[in-house]
Image (cartoon, rainbow, N blue to C red):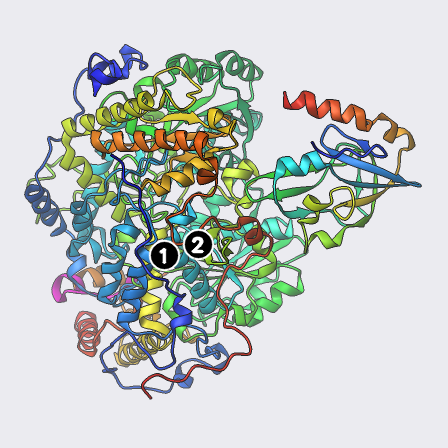
Amino acid sequence: MLEKIGVASTEKLFESIPESLRLREHLKVPAAMSEIELLKRFEDIGTRNQAAQRISFLGGGAYSHYTPTIVDHLISRSEFFTAYTPYQPEISQGTLQAIFEFQTLVCQLTGMDIANASMYDGSTAMAEAVLMAERVTRRSKVIVSSAIHPQYLEVAHTYVQHAGIDLERAEFDPASGQTPASAFDAIDDQTAAIVVQSPNFFGSIEDVSTLADKAHNAGALLVVVVTEAMSFGLLRSPGACGADIVVAEGQSFGVPLSYGGPYVGLFATRDKYARQIPGRLVGEAYDKQGRRGFVLTLATREQHIRREKATSNICTNEGLIALAATIYLETMGRRGVQEVAHQCAQKAHYAAREIEKLACFSLPFSAPFFNEFVVRAPAPASPMLDKLAKEKGIDGGIALSRFDSKRPNDFLVCVTETNTREEIEALVEGLASLSH
Amino acid sequence: MITKVTTHPSQNEQLIFERSQPGRAGFSLPALDVDETSIDEMIPRDFQRDDDLAGMPEVTEVDVVRHFTRISTWNFSIDLGLYPLGSCTMKYNSRLNEKVARIGNFANLHPLASEAESQGALQVIYELQQHLAEITGLPGISLQPAAGAHGEMTGIMIIRAFIDARDGKEASSRRRTMLIPDSAHGTNPASAHLSGFTVKTIRSTAEGLTDLDHLRELCAHGDVAGLMLTNPNTLGLFEKNIQEICRIVHDAGGLVYMDGANMNALVGVARPGDMGVDVIHLNLHKTFSTPHGGGGPGSGPCCCTKEMEPFLPVPRIVRVNNGDTSADSRSEIPNYRLDYAQPQSIGRVKAFVGNYGMMLRALAYILTHGYDGLREATEAAVLNARYIAHGLLTDYEKPFDSPPMHEVVFTDKRQARKGVHTLDIAKRLIDYGFHPPTIYFPLIVSGAMLIEPTESVGRQELDQFIEAMQSIAREAVEDPELVLNAPHTTRIGRLDEAAAARKPVLRWRPKENTEPLAVAGG
Amino acid sequence: MANVPDNLHYSKDHEWVRVEGDTAVIGITDHAQEQLGDVVYVELPKAGEDFAAHDSFGSVESVKAVSEIFTPISGKVAEVNQSLADEPEKVNKDPYGEGWMIKMKMSKSGEVDSLLTAAEYEDFTKAESE
């Protein structure tokens, strides 16, 4: 080939790079490994992730749900997993139709009019929602509930630090674990949005309808954040409660925990804001013969056309993960999602009742919850949970001291349909034995 | 001899919602094994869903398998053949990397599990960090950004934070200009804007390189915070004056950000850090072969100089002792931890540690290639692009004379005389069984076709591609209508995108006034 | 060739102005709509907003491009062509008629005279495309 193109040597291919910049030695990375060696190496490293083998009651933004076998089979098809952005609709209808179905499912779950093709994850979706609220209202203050996932709040702060948006905090009520409407009394005619998570970081279900009224009375938007998307199967949809923008983490729908990613951000809003939504959108279109197909549409919002005036700098979506969520939701279907949500709530409430029976443990928050709740231990939670993991093989929850040093004894417990009665009983017995 | 595809093999398939029938189900769950209480006792009625999830599909497992298998056949994919999208690096996605990402001890690991019990996961991140730092020559690194544009935003925020700290808020506030070449990807200006910068555009020379005189002129006013440069640039040309470019920007008090979209031309051959670049983002889904997945997930690590490291997002993943990491894999002593104590950090850009599954795949890619394989991949990628550049020269206009690196730009100038444009050529390529190149980008080249073959293709297929392009060039002269109405072999023809944008239909809704479908099987 | 009616005034940003008493009717030229391709969305101001000459008063979108539109003259918006919200394609089909965009009460009387005549505009677009 070199001969055909008239280049004397491989080195000459790189002549446009000044010689002083060309590496003379090889990179200091290891020599190539064979398939056998590589798998062995990763299997070995993996054994150091003892937490992956524990009975787990961890939630807090990432959830262990059952995934039907066909999800991984179908997303592993070459046609989906080795394709790219559907720039050429004639040879991308598989991806485009799947995204159209994804957008529809997200609308149905959230109770909203339109949804995009997905964002990186729940946390970045929330940050984009804050930016969008500022664009829509041309107001610069955003009030966020302090019961939102702490990492989501950090991401929002990073995103808005140069955008001229003031993020103010609305404190949750330490008795109920909810953010009352009165916490948002700083709302005024410069407030773009109030942002609330429900169920919130502590698992408490917020009174979203009341907060919607609070926002709308001031001409602001209500942004609702959901980290446990399975709750859509049982709880009133944010859309039905009056939300203007709904963002959610879609990991619960057939996506492995995978130490935090890749996940998929859901982003839904009202029809009237279609031209303000960030990210990709797929819409219906027809060819000359009247055959239905799907295309990327309303692209003029996006960075490749509007450049610095775009609605977001996001270029891609989380295609394959959105596909996994779509296949999950279609396989489980209407009744499956309801059944999983029902089991999660039943099992979590069973666990909560049993833990509450223990002499030294209590539930500090009174608000209704879905499948996560805070437990107050008689002693610092963090060392107790470490001990529970080591001695009983159970990850009993997330110590809240990681996020708030004033809550040393509190920990967040999550129960899903994958936790059996035996596991719940083992957790309760383990806690009882450690509190002595 | 190139053989044209004739007809599309697969059948029609409705939307899943149109297949749905009440009562069908594709799931099975164990019976509830705890004492059941009424939902009303747990959750007030007002908080409960009241629409019964109307509209959600009800189908069987085999319905779902057939549905997605059928619609999948409407996609082109890397595994089908050459997918020469310029600046997208559509290289082969190894199945071995997929297997690695699915190892239970990684796939089932919760992101908030204790550090002590997640040492394997942290070790993978740390090792990948080390390798990417070596490949780029930039020692500071964060793997948190979830995509290229996200890594860009992170890099630009770091530049802003660095200048704020260096100059003080007052002086820094006068440095709010970000220079971006006219050939840049649209995410560059969008990311700069998100970080509070005003964009000024640098012209390209007739040669297709950054105009140094214009750069000097723009740098003369003391307001430049930085330059965002893709190298090789989006025309596939290496910015041979890169050291001079960096010097001009540095002398003006600015920093140089490199968009690493085109790193597949450089790995193992040259390092941005050695060129004078201060910050770069990488695309693990391009250069390091993690699957594109129909548009994500990506991963966009941000690498920077030692001086800029304190500003990277938290948490950082650090090694806490000097012990040999490979010694005892069951050691009780943690070797890695999450470090939040970075007071100058720009903050977190994403929940948890980033797109971890992509990190596993990228590390597997690096380890299976080794130092030799990484360099060989770069050499093959450049050789393949040069081969295409050579092969198309007789039939297509090549607007820049300089030899390209890993991608090459051609235009429709000759075909346009017959009324055949880049879009038509792209659509006709589909009939020959190839994915079209990136078209109409970069914006500064009228009718651009940006072709990046990558290393994952052999000479035979390159010859077939060249032959197909030559054949289309002949058709454009002899039978332009054939090209103008392409593609002829796909399930659907060109779609009316204007109508779709005027009255957007972004979701399925049930048809009104139709009788509900009967329950199947009673 | 694009249609350039004699009775209108033109700007170098490819807008046209038709004077009706103290009101200016404004739209984009046939040449501009040809360059844009199928118009899919027109963003217009609200009646009552004030603009100086050369201000951006909205934008026109095709499938893959956005162009800002500028007021050739100063004044207050008196009326907006609401029908473009539903039928933006009017800008393509009838740029000088049903595709008009806004009507403005002119605030500076002499401004219109500084705009291009039909012949000057034709020369301008020819020069621009070379």
* Viewer-closest of B46 and B459: B459
Residue closest to the far front? B478
* Amino acid type at image mark 1: Ala
* Amino acid type at image mark 2: Ala
For the residues labelled 2 and 1, say whether their Cβ atoms are less than 8 Å apart.
yes
Q: Give the magenta part as a residue range.
A: A388-404
Q: Chain of mark 1?
A: A
The picture places residue A185, in percent across and down from the top left corner, at 61, 62
Q: Secondary structure at mark 1?
A: helix
Q: Which quadrant: the C terminus of chain C?
A: top right
Q: Are marks 2 and 1 on the same chain?
A: yes
The picture places residue A89, in percent across and down from the top left corner, at 42, 48
Q: Chain of mark 2?
A: A
What residue would you read off at disc 2? Answer: A117
Crowding at dot 2, Cα within 10 Å, few <14 / some 14-19 / many 20+, comes out as many
Q: Secondary structure at mark 2?
A: loop
What residue would you read off at disc 1? Answer: A322
Q: Is residue B408 above or below residue A418?
A: above
The picture places residue A160, in percent across and down from the top left corner, at 51, 44
* Viewer-closest of B337 and A159: A159
Let me know if residue A393 is in the magenta part: yes
Residue at 54% x, 32% y is B197
